[in-house]
Every structure is written in C-alpha cells, then in structure tokens.
Amino acid sequence: MLAQAIVERSGREPIREVFLSPDAFAHRTAEASIAEQLGDVLVSNGLPRPAPADDDRVGGWQWMYQLLENDAWMITENCAKLIEGIPLLVRDDRRIEDVRKMDGDDAADAARYGIVSGARWVEKNFVAPGFSSTFSNLASGSIENAALKGGATQPHFVHGMPLGEQIARQVTATEPTSRAIHFQRLEGEAKKFFRPKHLPRRHF
C-alpha cells in the first residue's frame, strides 16, 4: 500500500532515485525486506528500485546547517512539515554533534537523506573531471564545486556578457539545491576573475 501510494503521488515526475533508510533493507520476519517489497511495486510502475540512503547522521546535519547558513538550500513553501520541523530540532545531550530523536522529525530525516544521498548521485553524474568532490567539499565546510558543461575543468568568464547568463551556461545540474550550490561557487569565482588587478610598481 505504501509503494502504491508513492506511485500515485509521483505522477509523471521523472524520478531517478528512491532512497530508503538502511533499516528498510534488513531481513527480519518476512522473507523479503521492506525495501524489496516496496521495490517490486515501484519497478512494476516504472520507478527505480530503492537504494540505501547515506546514514551519516552527524555529517548530514552539519551539511544541512551549512546549506541553510549559506542560503544554498531551496525549500519550497509546500514543504510544510519540513519548515515546521527544522526549528524544533535540538542537540542530543549524549552526542552533541547529533540531533536528538523525537516525534515529528521524519521530514528532517528525509531531507537529510535526500540532500546527502541525492548530492552523491549528482556528483557521480554531473561533476566534470578535474573538480574535487562536491560531497567532501560541502561536508568539510567549503562550497567550492560546480558541474560545468562540456567537461570543462575550470569556469570561464568574459567581459561584456551578463554574469548571470555566463553562470547559467556553465551549470548543468538540474536539481534546485545543487544548482544553488553551483551558482554560489561560480559567483565567487567570478568575483575573483573580475577583481581589479594591481599594477606592478614602476621603478624610476
């Protein structure tokens, strides 16, 4: 019933990955795991078979915090449960880097799964050769990576063309959060490129 509800709510949306908690892949009482049972229904309706979400809680929460702090995470108005739940998250007294489990944190957990696991999918499919890892950079506190068109290994800027248009032409990511991250990185690179150059001192 859950899998069928997912199918019905997905409509015609092009879905590349379905992430589930790693717990869903455990074999308990039934012969097939929850992930396998869900997957059979999803696949029969044209959706991908579920993949285990990244369950690095501490890294995921830190990344979410950093994205919010840098205005690099787009949360739409219809994500009511997520908007309501994020301000309620508190530190776990026994593990201060983690968030304390509580009723109603499902939306935040789902967002954490989506951001970390989804970004790894973006990294695998969109990041051009020559760039360092999107996930590693963000998790370590540096939003520096961009997916560029044509396999470019570095951003390219010219004078005389609107900066926004130049950046848009170089970003290939389609997922809103990834696009925001890539735009932010390229804007930083553009500021360096267009920064006035200091002329060398002349000696007489």
Image (tube, grey):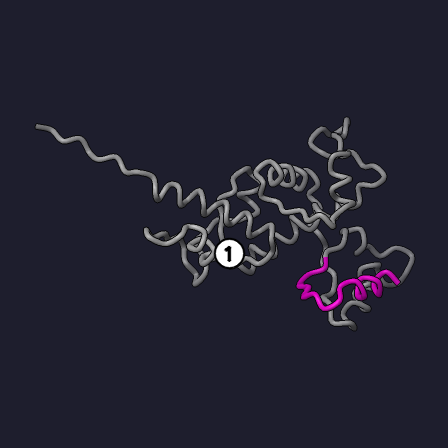
Residue occupying the point 76% across, 70% down = 43
Judge by depth and name the residue closer to the eye, 131 or 175: 175
Residue 13 belongs to magenta span = yes
Mark 1, other Cα within 10 Å: few <14 / some 14–19 / many ≥20: many
Judge by depth and name the residue closer to the eye, 126 or 13: 13
Residue 202 belongs to magenta span = no
Q: Is residue 185 left or right of 96 when viewed as pictured?
A: left
Residue occupying the point 51% across, 59% down = 172
Q: Is residue 42 left or right of 15 when viewed as pictured?
A: right
Q: Is residue 30 above or below residue 98?
A: below
Extent of the magenta region = 1-18
Quarter placement of the N terminus: bottom right
Residue occupying the point 70% across, 45% down = 112
Q: Is residue 16 above or below residue 77?
A: below
Rendering quarter of residue 70:
top right
Residue beneath disc 1: 127
Residue occupying the point 65% across, 41% down = 64
Q: Looking at the picture, how far across and down is residue 45, in whole percent?
A: 78, 72
Q: Is residue 126 above or below residue 72?
A: below
Q: Is residue 98 left or right of 36 when viewed as pictured?
A: left
Judge by depth and name the residue closer to the eye, 18 or 72: 72
SS state under label 1: loop
Rendering quarter of residue 17:
bottom right
Quarter placement of the C terminus: top left
Judge by depth and name the residue closer to the eye, 166 or 38: 166
Badge 1 amino acid: Val
Q: Looking at the picture, how far across and down is residue 14, in whole percent?
A: 67, 66
Q: Looking at the picture, how far across and down is residue 89, in whole percent?
A: 76, 34
Q: Looking at the picture, how far across and down is residue 158, in whole percent?
A: 33, 52
Q: Is residue 44 above or below residue 142?
A: below
Rendering quarter of residue 29:
bottom right
